[in-house]
Image (cartoon, rainbow, N blue to C red):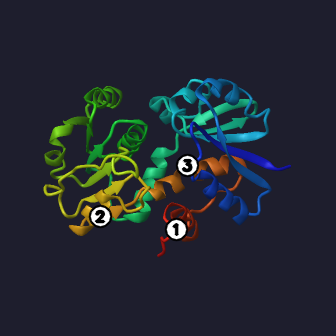
Amino acid sequence: MTLKACVIGWPISHSRSPIVHNYWINKYGIDGIYERVPVEPGNLPKFIRNLHLNGYRGCNVTIPHKEAVFDLVAPADDSTRLLGAVNTVYVRDGATLGSNTDGEGFLANLSTKSPSCRIDGSKVFVLGAGGAAMAIVNALLESDAAEIIVCNRTPERSEKLRQKFGNRLSICAWEQRSDGIIDSDLLVNATALGMKGQPPLELDLTRLPSKAVVMDTVYVPLATPLLIAAGDRGNPTVDGLGMLLYQAVRGFELWFGVRPQVNDELYNLVARSIDPEYWR
C-alpha cells in the first residue's frame, strides 16, 4: 500500500516540502508519495477531520493554518500545547495528533552549521514575534538561554510572547533594535523582512560583537542581505534553509517509519530550486 502525506496551506505552490520528502522517499526506497494540497481556510476543519479517510498518514501545515489546526487536533506534547500552533499532523490509533517541530529544526540547523555556538547561558536577540519566533524562543528557553530579547514591529505581539514565557524574556522597541543587539551571543531574524518580495531588514550591526552568530530564518534568497552584511564583518552566519530541512525530519519518521538524514545532496537540491545557479 502506498503511504501518503502532504503539506497544506493557502496558497501552497511555493512550498519546497515536496522536494524534501520525495527525495527521502526515493532515497530510502519507500512506497510513498508526498503532495501539495491547497486548502482554503473554510475547508480546513473538514480536511483535517477526513485526513485519514482520504488515505493520508499525516500532513505538514504552513501559512495561514498553523494556529487554526491546533484547535482541530490533540496536542502531542507540552511544547505544542504551550505554543498553540501546529506544523506537523499525524494519525495514531484513530486519533489525529499535532506537533510543532520548528524549534527542533532551528536548534538542529544551528548546531550543524555553527557547532561552537552555545545556547546555555547565552544572550539571544530575536527579531520577530510571530509563529516562527515563538517556536524559536521556546526552544532557546528549553536549551537554557540566560536572556532572550524580542524585538518586533508590533509591540503588542512582543508583549504577548513575554506573557507566555515570563521574565526570562525581555522586549526591545523596534526603533532601538540596532542598539539592543549589544553583547548578544546570537542574533536571529525570525521576520519575513529580507525575503524576496518583502521590504528589507534595516539593521545596523555596528554594536553586535564580532563573535556573535547571525541566523536568518529566511531562505529565499539563500544569502539574505543580513547574512551578507554579517559575513562581511566576520560574524559566523547560518542560513534559513537548514531549518526547513531539519524541521521535516520528525514528520517523515512519524509518517513513513524511517528517520531520515539531512545531507549535502538534499541541501543542494532544494537550494537549486530556489536559485538555479546555486552550486557549492
Q: Residue at x 61, y 25 (%)?
A: 72
* Residue identifier under label 1: 276
Query: What type is the residue that disc 2 sits on?
Result: Ile
Q: In front of the other: label 3 or label 2? A: 3
Ranked by sequence position, the earlier of labels 3 and 1 is: 3
Mark 1: give few (<14), some (14-19) or many (20+) Cα within 10 Å: few
Q: In this view, does 150 lie to the left or right of 175?
A: right
Q: Is residue 55 left or right of residue 59?
A: right
Q: Is residue 264 above or below residue 93?
A: below
* Residue identifier under label 2: 228
Ranked by sequence position, the earlier of labels 3 and 2 is: 3
Q: Residue at x 28, y 31 (%)?
A: 154
Q: In front of the other: label 2 or label 1? A: 1
* Residue identifier under label 3: 14
Query: What type is the residue that disc 1 sits on?
Result: Pro
Q: Residue pushed farthest right?
A: 1
Compute the Cα span from label 3 to label 2. 24 Å
Q: Do the residues labelled 2 and 1 touch (CB within 8 Å)?
A: no
Ranked by sequence position, the earlier of labels 2 and 1 is: 2
Q: Is residue 213 visible?
A: yes
Q: Where is residue 83 in the image (x, y as percent from the top left)?
A: 45, 32
Asked whether 108 or 13 is in front, the reply is 13
Q: Position of residue 75 (x, y in %)?
A: 57, 30
